[in-house]
Amino acid sequence: MGDRFRLPPDFETFPAAKLERETLAGQLGRSHVPGASELSKRLGACFRDRRCGSGACRVCQRKERKILIRAANVGLPKDRPLLRISWVPRGGVIPLGGLAGFDLRRFIASRLRALQRALPGITAFGGVDVSLNTFENGTPVWVVHLYLLIEAADSKLLRAAIRARCRGEPSAPRPFHFQKVSRAGRAKVFSYALKPAFYKRSGFIDATGRANTRPQALPAGAAVEAALFLDRWPLQRRLILHGMRLVRGRDGLRLVRRDGGHSRRGSRA
Ligand SMILES: [Zn+2]
């Protein structure tokens, strides 16, 4: 199609991804948590001609991110308004050590049902980020953030509909953050929504991700927990798709919209 789409300037380089994978493989190899040393071995055996495909592998996820960012750029037409909603949903706070028992698919599905009730017929694309938050040097907790990109113009009415139907985390000072996405800002926003790894944030739970301090690397124990989680829930399984689906075609992955397909009466953007 010859679109001149460019990845954002801060997109990770191949050497950086490889280095992060090596660091993580080392942390996993030193851990006694069940499954950690097996995952370390898999990451260590990821080569050009035989990729491991793990959700914890920064090299494999970098490749996956490129494909998905391009698919989003084509699948979400530039002539339609795009709104980014960052949402820390109620129930999205998990104690340290609790990621292994967290059912992400179920969590996403129930939140999307709420979104559907708030904005019937809406098309949404996005991803999930989990960060390790510490408040005022208290016990750190995992916090789940949903990054939704919806095809709609920002309005007071839309925000009110979302706040009425979608519950925010009560302990978060700002569980919602809305931001209009400019044409120039699309690549960066797609990249941000499709995060390849999890980080630590000091400060309050906040949906903006900016009011916090800069994201820091996870301590080794948390990094192992996050890696095992990411291995179970790689990027494609963390994708949020509503009103559209991912189709594997001859030219790679494509986002196909559901509108017009099935009878979706009363749906409007
Ligand atoms: Zn790999």
Image (cartoon, grey):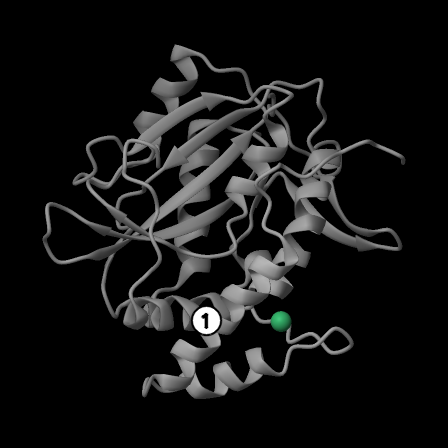
Depicted 200 relative to depicted 211: above or below:
below
Q: Amino acid at mark 1?
A: Thr
Camera-side residue of 196 and 169 = 196
Q: Is residue 262 left or right of residue 180?
A: right
- The residue at the far top in this view is 156
Camera-side residue of 56 and 8 = 8
Any part of residue 124 in sight: no
Q: Which residue is mark 1?
A: 23
Q: Is residue 115 left or right of residue 181?
A: left
Q: Quadrant of the C terminus?
A: top right
Residue at the (65%, 58%) spot, across then down: 14
Figure quarter occupied by ligand 1: bottom right
Residue 105 position within the rendered picture, expressed as x and y whole percent measured from the top left: 46, 58
Q: Quadrant of residue 50 in the image? A: bottom right
Depicted 225 relative to depicted 151: above or below:
below
Q: Quadrant of the N terminus?
A: top right
Q: How many C-alpha atoms fall within 10 Å of the one at disc 1: few (<14), some, or many (≥20)?
A: few
Residue 166 position within the rendered picture, expressed as x and y whole percent measured from the top left: 34, 34
